[in-house]
Image (spheres, coloured by chain):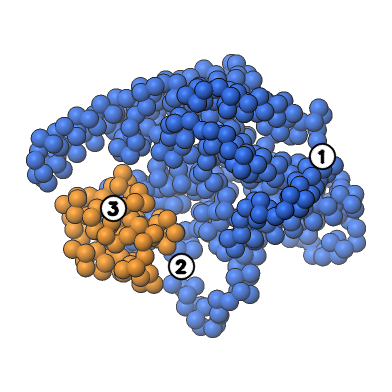
Chain colours: A blue, B orange
Amino acid sequence: MSIISLTFIGFAAVLVCLYFLLPRKCQWGVLLAASMLFYLSSGWKSIVYILVTIGTQYFLALMLERQNDRMREEFAESEADGRRKKEIKKKYAKRKKKYVFFSVLINVGLLCFVKYTNFLIENINVLLREIQAPQLAALNILAPLGISFYTFRSVGYVIDVYRGKVKAEKNIGKLALYVSYFPAIVQGPIDRYADVAEQLYGGGHSFDYRRFTFGAQRMLWGYIKKLVIAERAAVIVNEVLGQYATKGYEGLTVFFGIALYSFQIYADFSGGMDIVCGLSEIFGISLTENFRRPFMAQSVAEFWQRWHITLGAWMRNYLFYPLSLSPAFNRLGKKCKKIFGDRWGRVIPTSLASFIVFVIVGVWHGAHWKFVVYGIYQAVFVSTGTLFEPFYEKMRAAFRMREDGLWQIFRILRTFFILTIGRYFSIAASTRDALGLLRATFRSFNPWVLLDGSLYTMGLNRKNFWLLLYAIVGLMIIDVLQERGIRIRSWIAERNLVFRWTIYYMALFGLFIFGMYGPGYDAASFIYQLF
Amino acid sequence: MREEVLAVLQSVRKDVDFLTETKLVDDGILDSFDIISVVSELNEKFDVDITADELEPENFNTLDAITALVASLQ
């Protein structure tokens, strides 16, 4: 069931009624039943995967909790002897790591099996072809809905139990709800257990009109982003990608298409988040925000703090920090300090850890070499930003550059340009294709295509084209307002009745009239759903 | 100890007033690179073992929280 289908709207409406009409203690049960139903609607065959995850993580977290309890008992007996406490901690850390190891092995193992087995077979086949050996057949593996997202959620939960940050959940049904909560399973957000558990099954939520209207408005805005902007932008983006070689698109035409893809993916992904966060808001559940006006970023590093925030936070908490503080990286830091001095001794290992994390994030996007290149591309900008910061500072001082508004706008545009070039690798069919697109972009300088009507021949007529541009400008204006701390829904709520309902009807009719729908009013799937 | 922790923090970020800031992590004043630098320095200076398990915002939001963390691990 796609979250942009009429079926989903009906499903959500029935669910909201049940959620608030049944006794409050049943609310988490209603959400669990709905999540399972939602999951089954995507195909019953893949449900085994998520059940394995729920079962293993439930059991391993309980085992970890038992170790935590024993450790606390021994702490109490040690009577504040610091040295003894350290020994106890070390002893239990060793035991507990085994459970975390199994949690990662089974669940990340399943994720890798589903996502990367055929990629591995493809690459082995390349080698086999070289030595003229028989080829391996690709496996027919069905990717279960949301496997990346629920794996990250559940592994994060087990690690948090290991760290003693949260208590293991004793009710397997409740844990199943956290892992499979249907709004967040399609493409996140990857909430931490501590942030949502209490909201999911802590007490019960009564119906709140203001929360309902705020949630519904956010959902509506999400649908507008997805159906009016993302689906419309996709027409030109697909035309550029599919036809650049045959129709000879080049120069700014190609760059315009890929830049448009930046807006498409933003409207697509953040629109999806608005829908699921809005629906959750109606339930009284506040999910973690995944975006913070990413196009206002003034550096690539800052962009990644504003884009897909929950994935970044997951990577930081469970990969970057442990890697950076690991004994091997400590040793590297000390060596670098001896050779290059204090600053480089600090910066080199951290930059290396960041580099590794970005490559992994790149590969997470899909089993393809182009995503490795994409990850490395991002990593280079993030790492060098830190490594060469003193150099940049000196340059700014030497050229007497002031950090005024103009400079900030320049940095925003520069960041957008760098990221758009990176998008060539994430969107093209292959690395070779991405390089082909880049060559086509830089072999010609043709700014007139922006004015001579060429862009109207790429699948969108003049009216639709301008509608898309106006909608993108509107999206950016709203981002700027939010960046300045203006709460748009609160602002609307404070207006009079006529004004409020004029806005609601305009948005609703805007969606009906300008939304781009597929057959049966089902739009294409979300881009991040495929990751 | 507070003074020594302050010196470590100032060696990593000279531009931050650690005596007044109360949301060093929540407000994004210290990023993940800064935190790793601070932790490496603290581990070395105080001979403690701050691991990834302790890297939660509540332990790094203020100078006092960081000092308390170091003290609890000694």
Image quadrant in which you'd find residue A338? bottom left
- Secondary structure under tag 3 reads helix
* Co-location on one chain, circles 2 and 1: yes
Image quadrant in which you'd find residue A516? top right
What is the chain letter for disc 3?
Answer: A
Q: Residue at x 44, y 59 (%)?
A: B27
Res. A50 visible in picture: no
Q: Position of residue A451 (x, y in %)?
A: 87, 63
Q: Residue at x 33, y 32 (%)?
A: A167
Tag nearer the camera, 2 or 1: 1
- Secondary structure under tag 1 reads helix
The correct choice, above or below, for A158 with respect to A47 in the image is below
Label 2, label 1: how many angstroms apart (C-alpha)? 50 Å
A290 or A275, nearer to the observer: A275
Res. A164 visible in picture: yes
Q: Residue at x 85, y 61 (%)?
A: A449
Q: Check disc 2 and report the residue beneath it.
A: A388
Marker disc for residue A330: 3
Q: Which residue type does callout 2 highlight? A: Phe
